[in-house]
Image (spheres, helix red, strand yellow):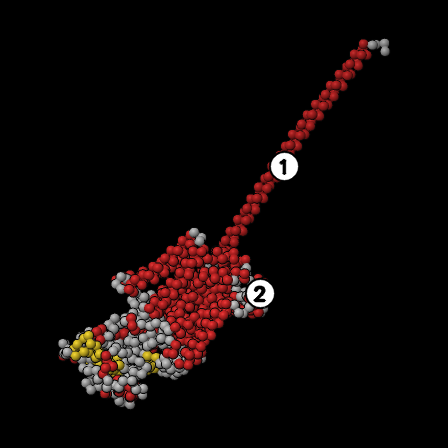
Amino acid sequence: MSISRRKFLGWMGAVAAGIGASSSKTANAGGHFTGYPDSMGVLHDMSLCVGCRLCEEACNKVNDLPQPDKPFTDLTVLDEKRRTTPTSHTVVNRYDNVEYNGKPVFRKMQCNHCLEPSCASACMVAAFKKSPEGAVKYDPTVCVGCRYCMIACPFEIPTYEYNENLVPLVQKCTMCAPRIEKGELPACVEVCPKEALIFHKRDDLIKIARERIRKYPDRYVDHIYGEHEMGGTSWLYLSPVPFHEVGMREDLGVTSGPELAHGSLGLVPMIVGLWPAFLLGMKGMSLRREKVATKEKAEAVAIAVAKANAEGDEKVKKAKEFAEKQKEILLVKAKTEQEKAVKKALEEAAESESKTETKIEEDPDA
Amino acid sequence: MPDKNSGRGLFTLTNLVAGIIVIIGLYLIFLRFKGGLGAVTNFSDDYPWGIWKSFFIFIVVPIGAAGYTTGAAVYLFGMEKYHSVVRLAVLIGFLSYCTAAGSLTLLDVGRPERIIMAYPFVVQPGTTSLLFEVALCVVLYITVLLIEFLPFSCEWLGYRKARNWLLKGTLALAIFAVVLSTMHQSTLGAMWTITPAKLHPLWQSPYLPVYFFVSSIFSGLSVLIIMTTICKHFFKHLMNERYLDEDEGVILAFGKGACVAMLGYLTIQVFGLATADKWHYLFSSMYGYWYLLELLGFVALPCLFFAMGCREKNTKLIRWTAVWTLLGIILNRFNVTLLCYNYHLPFSEKYTPTWMEVWILITVVTIVGLVFRFIVTRMPILYDHPDFKSHH
C-alpha cells in the first residue's frame, strides 16, 4: 500500500480545484439579491378576474399549442381543479368555497418568474436563466430531462411531455419573452378584458398594488403575494380573500431556493479540505497503535525470554549446586567409609599381630 | 478457480425465472422508448419522480455505501484483520453505483443520449445544482470503484503487472471514496432542502444532508452484513478458511459500528425536532405516527437489537437486525422522496406506480443479481486467488 505523497496531493488538488470552481458561482447566491433593476412583471388582481378564460386561449394561440378537447368558451372546465400541463401554460381555477361581492374568486396560475428561480438553481445543465428583463427562460437544446426543476419549483409550475418518446421537453410559461422583445405585451395581459392583469416594471407594480390596498382596504387582504415569497417573484398577486383559500401556499418563507440549496453546497469545500486530513490522521493513529502494539509485543516477548533464560540459569545452577553437594556428601561418605574400612583393617591387622606375638611368647623354644 | 456452478447447467429454475422476468422487462423498456415515459409509468407533473428515482438513486446509493464504509473501516480505522470482506464490499459498491447511474440514464431521464454525451459536464455544467454535485461525485466515485474492482478481474485473467500497479493506490482510493461518498450521500438529502414546503415538516429539515450521510453509514454496514450472510448461504463452497474464520468477527464489529451510528442518528433526529420545535406534528396527524414508526420502529429498535446481539455475541440476531435496518433505510428514503412529498395534495392526486414500473424495477434488480452471481463465481471475491496470495 505504498503511495507517493506527491501523487496523492496532486489528486486531491485536482478534486479541490474542480469542486472549488463548481461552487464559486453559488457563493454569489448567498448575497441578498432583490431582482434586476427595471425588470418587468405582471400584477394579477384577483378581485377583478371574472374567469372568462380569454387569457388561456391567448396563451394557447401565441405558443402554438394544440387545441384542447373542450373549447375555451366552455366554462364548465372551471368546475374541476386544474394545474398547468405541457399544453396549457396557464390555467384559471375557480374557488367556490370563498366569495367576493357574492361571486366566487378566480385565480390565474402560470410560472411566477422568480427573481432567484429554484428551477435555475436545480438544473444540472443550467437550462433555466433569469433574464434581466424578467422572464425565466428555458433552453431546450441542453435539457436532459431529469425533471429536478419540477421537484424544486415551490409553485408546481414546470410540466413535462411524458408522452413524447424521443425529444420530450419541459414546458412552462415564457412570460411571452419573444413578444416583449418586440415591444408587445404578454398575450394574456393584452387580452384580459377586466385589466385583472397589468404589465409594468416590477417596482412600479409594487407601488400600484400598495396604493390599491391603501385606497380599498375592504377589497384586499393586506399582502402582495410574490413581493417576498421564495425571495420574490416577477408575477405579483392581490387577493380579496386569504391566499391559502385560493390554493396559494403561505408557508413558503422568504428565502429563495438557491439560497436554501447554497447552505449544503457551501459545505463541499470544507469536506474536501478536512476529510483527507482527518482520515489520514485516523490512519496515522491506527498505524501508530499497530506499531506500538508490535513494539510492546516484541518487548514483552524479550522480557519473557530473558526471564525464562534467567530462570533456566537458576535451575541449572541449583542443579549443579545440588549435584556438588551430593558429590561432596557422597565423597565424605565414601571417605568416612573408607577410613572406617582402613581403620577396621588396621585394627584387625593389629589384633592378629598381637595374637601372633603372644603365640610366640607362649612358645619360646620354637 | 473453475466455475463450480457450471456443472449445474444453464437451465436451472432460477435462471428460467430470471429469464422470463428479464424478457418481459426488456419488452416493457422497449415500450418506454416507443411511447415515452408516459406509456409505462404514472409519472406526473406533480410527481415527476416515481419509484425509479426513489429506488435507483435514493435507495441503491446508500446500499452502495457498503463500499466506502468497509474500505474506511479496514484501511483507515485500523480494522485490517477483517480484510477478507473488502472485496465483497467493493463489488457491492461498484454494482450499486453502476445500477444507479445506468438505470437512471437509460430509463428515467427523458434524453438519455444527452447524459451519455455528458451534457452536464461538457456542454453546459449547471454548477449551482445539487443534482450536478451528485452526478459529478457519482461519476468520480464509479471511477474510484472501478480502479478498486479491476485488480480482481486482473487476478481472474492473470494480468499480474496491471494488478500490482492498480493496488498501489489503495490508501488514496479509500480516502477518495470517503470524501466523495460524504458529499454525494449528504447531497442526496440536501436536494430536498431546495423546496421548503413540499416535503412534510417532520422529514423536511436543514439537517437533511447530515441525516442522509449518517444513515448511509449504518445502511452500508448493514448491507455488508446481509451480503456476507447471503454469500455464506449460497457460495460457501467458494469461501476460503480466512473468510470463514473472520466472518463472526466481521459481523460483530460491523453490528457494533451500525449500532453506534444509529444512536448518533437518533440523537440528531431528536435534536432536529427540538431545534425547529416540531413536537406538535408528532401526534397531530397520520404523518406524525408514520414518522414515529419510522424512527422508533426502524431505527431505535434495530439499534437496540444490534446492541443486544453484540453484547451476547449473537451473530444470528445481528444478521436479522441488519435486514431490519435496511428496511428502515428503504422506508425512510421512500418517505422523503414519495410518501411524504406533496403531503398537501389530497389522496386522490397522489402517485401510485404502474405494474410496468415495478416490473422494470424488478428486471433491473434481477439483471444485477445475475451479474453479481457471474462475478462472485468467477473472480476471486470470496477467496484469495492461489497465484496472488502474497498481497495479504
Name which quarter of the figure residue A217 lies in: bottom left
At horizontal 33% and vertical 79% (from top left) the residue drawn is A159
Do pointers 2 and 1 mark residues of a single chain? no
Q: Is residue A267 visible?
A: no
Q: Where's residue A121, x and y in %?
A: 34, 76
In the rendering, which numbered label is found on residue A320?
Answer: 1
Alpha carbon distance from label 2 to label 1: 61 Å
Task: Kindly identify the residue that appears in the image at 77 percent across and 16 percent down.
Answer: A352
The location of residue A301, given as percent across then percent down, is 54, 49
Between disc 2 and disc 1, the foreground one is: 2
Q: Chain of mark 2?
A: B
Type of amino acid at the residue the image marks with label 1: Lys
x%, y% of residue A95?
Answer: 21, 77
Q: What type is the residue that disc 2 sits on?
A: Met
For disc 2, the marked residue is B1
Q: Indicate the quadrant where residue B324 lies.
A: bottom left
> Which residue is at a point 41% across and 78% down the rendered structure image?
B32
Q: Secondary structure at mark 1?
A: helix
Q: Is residue B246 above or below residue A207?
A: above
Left or right, A315 with respect to B109, comes to right
Question: Mark 1 falls within which chain?
Answer: A
**Lateral position of residue A247 relative to residue B382, left or right:** left
Quadrant for the C terminus of chain A, please.
Answer: top right
Of A253 and A143, nearer the camera is A143
Residue A120 is left or right of residue B29, and the answer is: left
Tell me which residue sits at (27%, 89%) in the image: A183
Local packing at callout 1 (Cα closer than 10 Å; few below 14, some 14-19, many 20+) is few
